[in-house]
Image (spheres, rainbow, N blue to C red):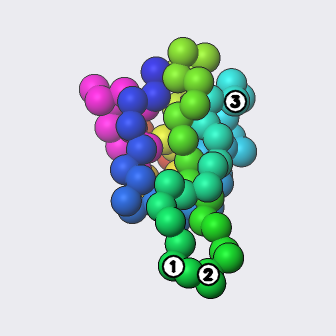
Amino acid sequence: MIEHIEIEKCTGCGVCDWVCPADVIHMEPEQTTPPAGLKEVRLLPVIRFREHCITCFNCEIYCPERIVDVHPVVRSRPRPW
Ligand code: SF4
Ligand code: SF4
């Protein structure tokens, strides 16, 4: 089951959301107040439905920043490329 995303290192690319077959991860607006006049809102991943996770490791494998931790015992899983 997905444990953690190092959100401070996240680029907001959205890959973890795209590759999740169980709709666990949702890209949502950053929880900070933008400076006055700034309209751009950054989307960051949120583990919204952890209980639906099927531990497929897709999010961990495909995250380009390698910051998703699905299981603390299994780190640095081999990638398909
Ligand atoms: S391990 Fe699989 S099911 Fe669980 S959050 Fe990651 S991509 Fe989704
Ligand atoms: S795939 Fe990685 S870098 Fe991209 S949004 Fe998800 S956690 Fe952030």
Q: Nearer the viewer, residue 35 or 7?
A: 35
Tag 1: amino acid: Pro
Q: Residue at x 56, y 81 (%)?
A: 36
Per the image, label 3 sits on a secondary structure element best described as: loop
Q: Which residues are magenta?
A: 67-76
Left or right? Give the position of 26 relative to 32. right
Q: Which residue is mark 3?
A: 23
Per the image, label 1 sits on a secondary structure element best described as: loop
Q: Are marks 1 and 3 in contact (CB under 8 Å)?
A: no
Q: Is residue 59 above or below residue 62?
A: above
Q: Which residue is mark 2?
A: 38
Is residue 34 highlighted in magenta? Answer: no
Left or right? Give the position of 73 relative to 34. left
> Label 1 to label 3, Cα distance in Å?
31 Å
From the Cβ of disc 3, is ligand 1 less than 8 Å away?
Answer: yes
Considering only order in the chain, which callout, 3 or 2, is on the residue closer to the N terminus?
A: 3
Q: Nearer the viewer, residue 48 or 59?
A: 48
Q: Which residue is mark 1?
A: 35
Q: Nearer the viewer, residue 6 or 33?
A: 33
